């Protein structure tokens, strides 16, 4: 199970100020992970709020089409609209993202919206640091869900996923530290680790040690093109990234999370989880869109085929 804000996504083919055509899709860190897991054959539930508008209908229709359970999603009957984001390619794989989510339906997600969905059963609850940045009720929902999941024996995964346009590092640290007390798996990039450690200026080793000492069982550090490392009380496990021609880096982190959680749900060991995580991330990097290029289970082996292979 996961929840958060899924927005309508308008993707430009060039600089927005020059006009031109836009492609319409949907995007959201949590729903990207949900779609990635569903494509790999797992049962996934997404809870959240969308506006009572056509874009909200698009969000729900897309998730359902991808096999994600939206039975507990709420269509907001107030004037709050579905959030919106715009993406524009600016230089190579550098992409600029603009958000229009203040006062959106997704920002108003509340504890009651998600606790009922969680009570319907789950093995893993996936959270991100984006949702508590959206507003007070969203922050309450994240903490309440994490606490309830831990009390019920549900594995809690938290991806820090810091968005500097949504809140400051200090606000993020204040909000995420209580969630960490109920977290089993922490996922962060190298520069995000200080946000969940008491000493903001701590190095990676000190930050990881502090997080493990706080009760987190696994700390997964995403290193982009340099792969990833999983830290546990027993030591560290490294995995190089798969080599691929980068087309679009947006969504790669969510694809990595989907692959890692898929391995966890399948009972794979840490090296096996990392292998699947870097594979799903490579699919995201090699294709355009936040989730459109994510693989199905029978496509996971495509990267092992020789270059130039045609599957007939």
Image: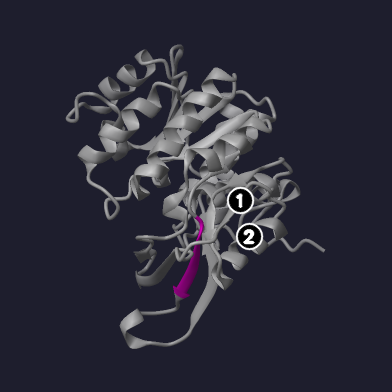
- Splitting the image into 4 quarters, where does residue 115 fall? top right
Residue located beneath label 1 in the image: 73
The quarter of the image holding the C terminus is bottom right
- In the picture, the quarter occupied by the N terminus is top right
Give the alpha-carbon distance from disc 2 to disc 1, as whole Å.
8 Å
Residue 195 lies, in percent from the top left, at 28, 34
Query: Is residue 204 rendered to the left or right of residue 40?
Result: left
Marks 2/1 in contact by CB < 8 Å: the verdict is: yes
Residue 296: which numbered mark, if any?
A: none
Q: For residue 121, which quarter of the picture?
A: top right
The boundaries of the magenta stretch are: 6-11
Q: Is residue 87 left or right of residue 63?
A: left
Q: Is residue 55 magenta?
A: no
Q: Which x, y percent locates residue 218? A: 47, 22
In this figure, which residue is indicated by the disc labeled 2? 60
Label 2: element kind: helix
């Amino acid at each position: 199970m996961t929840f958060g804000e899924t927005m309508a996504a308008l993707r430009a083919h060039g600089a927005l100020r020059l006009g031109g055509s836009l492609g319409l899709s949907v995007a959201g860190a949590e729903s990207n992970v949900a779609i990635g897991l569903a494509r790999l054959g797992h049962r996934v539930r997404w809870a959240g709020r969308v506006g009572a508008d056509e874009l909200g209908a698009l969000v729900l229709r897309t998730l359902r089409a991808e096999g994600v359970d939206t039975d507990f999603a709420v269509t907001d009957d107030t004037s709050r609209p579905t959030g919106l984001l715009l993406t524009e390619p600016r230089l190579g794989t550098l992409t600029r993202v603009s958000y229009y989510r203040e006062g959106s339906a997704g920002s108003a997600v509340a504890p009651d919206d998600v606790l009922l969905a969680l009570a319907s059963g789950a093995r893993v609850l996936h959270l991100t640091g984006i949702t508590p940045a959206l507003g007070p009720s969203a922050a309450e929902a994240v903490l309440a869900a994490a606490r309830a999941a831990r009390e019920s024996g549900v594995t809690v995964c938290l991806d820090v996923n810091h968005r500097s346009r949504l809140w400051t590092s200090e606000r993020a640290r204040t909000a995420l530290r209580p969630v960490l007390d109920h977290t089993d798996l922490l996922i962060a990039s190298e520069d995000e680790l200080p946000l969940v450690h008491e000493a903001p200026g701590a190095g990676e080793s000190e930050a990881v040690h502090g997080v493990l000492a706080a009760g987190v069982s696994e700390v997964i550090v995403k290193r982009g093109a340099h792969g990833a490392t999983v830290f546990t009380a027993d030591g560290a496990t490294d995995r190089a990234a798969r080599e691929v021609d980068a087309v679009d880096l947006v969504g790669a982190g969510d694809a990595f999370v989907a692959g890692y959680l898929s391995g966890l749900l399948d009972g794979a060991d840490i090296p096996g989880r990392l292998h699947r995580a870097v594979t799903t991330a490579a699919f995201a990097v090699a294709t355009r869109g936040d989730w459109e290029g994510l693989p199905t289970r029978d496509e996971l082996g495509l990267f092992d085929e020789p270059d130039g292979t045609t599957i007939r």
